[in-house]
Amino acid sequence: MKLIILDRDGVINHDSDEFIKSPDEWVPIPGSLEAIARLNQAGYRVVVATNQSGIARGLFNIVTLNAIHQKLHAAAQQVGADIDAIFFCPHAADDHCDCRKPKPGMLQEISRRFEVSLKGVPNVGDSLRDLQAGFVVGCSPYLVLTGKGEKTRDKGGLPPGTTIHNNLAAVVDHLLKSPAGLPSAA
């Protein structure tokens, strides 16, 4: 099975320092959903792994998060894309859970549920914690420059082997070896 793990905010949709607190605030990054459709067409199963501490902070509840994810699924389906599963951590950083990235618990759960090793599985994120969580379990790290990606790149300290791309569409171009799309960043 070909699997890819994507962060949500800053990779699939625009991020906000104020959190994405409602379906109206969830806006896809141009080309991201079409990139997921291309992954599906190439035989990839697409899984989202996202920290959602806004729940612990009381900014929104699980019903609202489900509504946001329903909008994501519906928008994806409109362009022929399918997201197999969305895993999320509802905890705040000071809850000291095992599922909040950069800890690997959420990705380990993906491995268990899909009964697959994550060694070499592409893990796409815009923050260091996204890449760290995947790296610990053997994923191949891909940093996108959307969302917090430029700041993450500029801070440095990326896991060994991290490749940097302009956006999710460019990652997919790289994975599928397609000449179309934006070139990889250096």
Image: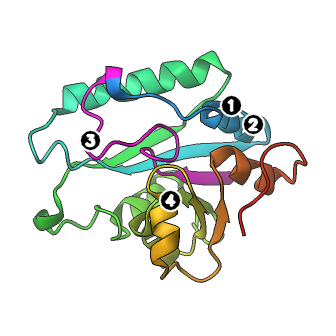
The region drawn magenta spans 1-24
Do labels 4 and 1 touch, CB within 8 Å?
A: no
Question: Gap between marks 2 and 4, in whole Å?
Answer: 22 Å
> Looking at the image, which residue sits at the far right?
179
Question: Gap between marks 1 and 2, in whole Å?
Answer: 6 Å
Q: Which mark is residue 34?
A: 1
Question: Gap between marks 2 and 3, in whole Å?
Answer: 28 Å
Mark nearest the camera among 1 and 2 is: 1
Which mark is first along the chain, 3 or 2? 3
Mark nearest the camera among 4 and 1 is: 4
- Say what secondary structure mark 4 lies in: helix
The amino acid marked with disc number 1 is Glu
Question: Gap between marks 4 and 1, in whole Å?
Answer: 20 Å
On the rendered structure, is 46 left or right of 41?
left
The amino acid marked with disc number 4 is Gly
Q: Which mark is residue 149?
A: 4
Return the residue at label 2: 38
Which mark is first along the chain, 3 or 4? 3
Compared with 180, 150 (above or below) is below
The question of residue 23 being in magenta is answered with yes
- Say what secondary structure mark 3 lies in: loop
The amino acid marked with disc number 2 is Arg
In which quadrant of the rendered view does residue 155 lie?
bottom left
On the rendered structure, is 20 left or right of 109?
left
In which quadrant of the rendered view does residue 127 lie?
bottom left
Return the residue at label 3: 19
Quarter of the rendering occupied by the C terminus? bottom right
The amino acid marked with disc number 3 is Phe
